[in-house]
């Protein structure tokens, strides 16, 4: 739905989406790449930690926006926070997968390992490798979907468009931005 908004409101409505995308780019692309190149695997925990901090900021700012900003701007902060929740859920799923692996590995040590046929007789933790890859896929899919949605939301914010379903969560009142007709020129 398109709303009657000022240029300043359009600019303000883009900010939460830009923050979300910058978060995704810096944490999931750059930090992940750097850690995989020169760091330890456990340092990948920095990615959801930093990203969750940014998402927490989106949550707090969304709450403030409902009180201080126009309905249109607040709706875009709300949508960015909702996308952040998708990422948080993907982190929880990935963490649960890794937790289950470590639980099984503790209960049945060596049961998820494979002989790597070296002369030292060592084993490869095959279960750990598979679990970490599947957990990464869960997060990757969530990042991909939310990144695309946020890119579309930036375009929508610049055109005065917001999701009218947000009104279920942020009620519209008399001071809310006016809805524009679907086809303002009357042409078909």
Image (cartoon, rainbow, N blue to C red):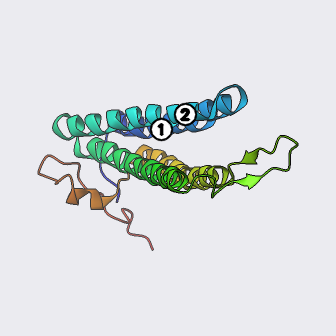
Residue occupied by mark 2: 27
Q: Quadrant of the N terminus?
A: bottom left
Place of residue 160 in the rendered image (x, y in percent of width and height, measured from the top left): 37, 48
* Depicted 26 relative to depicted 185: above or below: above
Q: Are marks 2 and 1 in contact (CB under 8 Å)?
A: yes
Q: Residue at 83% of width from left, 40% of height from top?
A: 120
Q: Which class describes the residues within 10 Å of circle 2: few (<14), some (14-19), or many (20+)?
A: some
Question: 56 or 160: which is nearer to us?
Answer: 56
Give the answer, above or below, for where 34 lies relative to 4. above
Q: Position of residue 82 (x, y in %)?
A: 35, 50
Please give the name of the residue rendered at 17% of the width and 53% of the height, measured from the top-left corner: 172
Q: Residue furthest left?
A: 174
Residue bearing the label numbered 1: 48
Q: State the image coordinates of residue 149 (x, y, percent, origin top left).
A: 49, 53
Q: Does the image show residue 80?
A: yes
| Residue found farthest to the top | 38
Which tag, 2 or 1, sits closer to the chain's start?
2
Q: Is residue 46 left or right of residue 35?
A: left
């Amino acid at each position: 739905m398109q709303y009657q908004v000022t240029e300043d409101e359009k600019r303000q409505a883009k900010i939460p989406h830009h923050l979300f995308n910058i978060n995704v780019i810096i944490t999931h692309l750059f930090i992940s790449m750097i850690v995989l190149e020169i760091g330890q695997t456990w340092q990948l925990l920095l990615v959801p930690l930093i990203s969750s901090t940014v998402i927490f900021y989106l949550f707090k700012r969304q709450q403030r926006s409902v009180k201080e900003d126009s309905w249109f701007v607040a709706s875009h902060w709300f949508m960015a926070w909702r996308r952040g929740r998708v990422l948080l859920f993907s982190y929880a799923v990935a963490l649960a997968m890794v937790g289950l692996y470590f639980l099984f590995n503790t209960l049945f040590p060596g049961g998820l390992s494979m002989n790597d046929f070296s002369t030292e007789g060592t084993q490869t933790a095959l279960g750990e490798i598979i679990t970490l890859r599947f957990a990464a896929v869960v997060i990757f899919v969530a990042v991909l979907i939310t990144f695309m949605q946020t890119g579309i939301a930036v375009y929508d914010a610049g055109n005065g468009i917001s999701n009218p379903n947000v009104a279920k969560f942020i009620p519209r009142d008399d001071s809310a931005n006016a809805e524009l007709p679907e086809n303002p020129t009357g042409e078909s």
